[in-house]
């Protein structure tokens, strides 16, 4: 059994939507932190965090970043980037994932008294998890479809998402999951399609990650190629790779059982002290044909 509690927490003057998942039994296990994709939110994870925490027997924390879900919006999201009265206004800058990983997330964890969390990030959230793990102690790091460098395929998919938002059904599909859907979409889309973001590259920071790491990538991901997790393996010797055929950008939706099983094996090894630092391990898993979630990417 679990207790799920939702609350709004003020971090650096910004109200953030959070959802905590607590087992009914006392546990000293690490808290599993869910970090959402570039168009994600607490609601867009649906019940997957609760189901995974129940399977693993771990407490969890899910939150929506500023401008997403029920968290506070970013004023003038398509205007010039600036700070007014100590708060950010306007477009996101290319360092937005660094700021989330190294400023917002540490403050949120401190406010909740969470130390050495187990991070689980999807897409942008995976990148944020990697950046946080490169500078802060964590029990482990699990990333699904992360971005360590900008690829042409990513830019093409995000350009297509803009067209689907302006001329297709994407805005209507996203609206139920965000208090301000235009803020959620444009803060993500415009920074990714900016000229300044094309040089985004966190590969140098990856060398600082010493925690156990599991990186998962779908072979049919329109937002990134296997080069993303291959680059992680080059920089992080202890990284384990899971390459999934017939899987798109959301492995936890496309192949939920396979991903949950891989995460469970990873966590079990953490608990048993069985993580091997002797080099990357790579495996390929087959699975059911993925469900499609066009536009809910990055």
Image: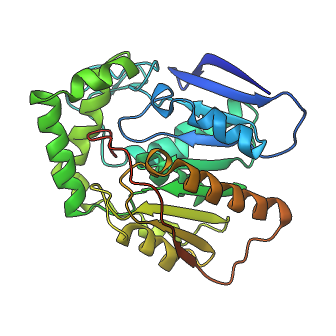
Please give the name of the residue rendered at 32% of the width and 38% of the height, measured from the top-left corner.
296
**In which quarter of the view is residue 67 placed?**
top left
Residue 258 position (above or below residue 39): below
Front in this rendered view, residue 41 or 81: 41
Please give the name of the residue rendered at 16% of the width and 54% of the height, measured from the top-left corner.
156
Front in this rendered view, residue 259 or 75: 259
- Residue 18 placement (x, y as % from top left): 59, 24
Residue at the far bottom: name it.
278
**In which quarter of the view is residue 86 placed?**
top left
- Residue 249 placement (x, y as % from top left): 37, 51
Left or right: residue 116 versus residue 92 is: right
Would residue 34 be seen by someone viewing this image from the given angle?
yes
Front in this rendered view, residue 108 or 146: 146
Left or right: residue 185 versus residue 24 is: left
- Residue 103 placement (x, y as % from top left): 53, 41
Left or right: residue 269 versus residue 244 is: right
Residue 271 position (above or below residue 64): below
């Amino acid at each position: 059994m679990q207790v799920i509690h939702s609350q709004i927490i003020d971090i650096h003057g910004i109200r953030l939507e959070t959802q905590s998942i607590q087992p009914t039994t006392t546990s000293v296990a690490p808290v599993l932190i869910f970090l959402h994709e570039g168009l994600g939110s607490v609601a867009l994870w649906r019940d997957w965090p609760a189901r995974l925490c129940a399977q693993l027997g771990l407490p969890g924390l899910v939150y929506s970043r500023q401008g997403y879900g029920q968290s506070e919006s970013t004023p003038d999201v398509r205007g010039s980037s600036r700070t007014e009265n100590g708060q950010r206004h306007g477009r996101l800058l290319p360092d937005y994932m660094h700021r989330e990983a190294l400023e917002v997330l540490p403050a949120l964890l401190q406010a909740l008294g969470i130390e050495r969390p187990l991070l689980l990030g999807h897409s942008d959230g995976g990148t944020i998890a990697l950046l946080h793990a490169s500078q802060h102690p964590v029990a482990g790091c699990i990333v699904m479809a992360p971005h360590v460098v900008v690829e042409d395929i990513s830019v093409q998919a995000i350009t297509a998402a803009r067209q689907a938002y302006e001329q297709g059904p994407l805005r209507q599909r996203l609206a139920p999951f965000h208090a301000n859907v235009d803020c959620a979409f444009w803060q993500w889309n415009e920074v990714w399609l900016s000229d300044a973001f094309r040089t985004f590259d966190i590969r140098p920071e990856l060398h600082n990650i010493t925690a156990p790491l599991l990186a998962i990538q779908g072979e049919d991901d329109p937002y990134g190629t296997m080069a993303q997790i291959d680059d992680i393996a080059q920089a992080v010797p202890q990284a384990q790779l899971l390459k999934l055929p017939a899987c798109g950008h959301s492995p936890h939706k496309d192949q939920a059982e396979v991903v949950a099983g891989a995460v469970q094996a990873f966590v079990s090894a953490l608990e048993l002290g069985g993580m091997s630092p002797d080099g990357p391990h790579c495996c390929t898993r087959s699975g059911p044909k993925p469900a499609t979630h066009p536009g809910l990417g990055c």
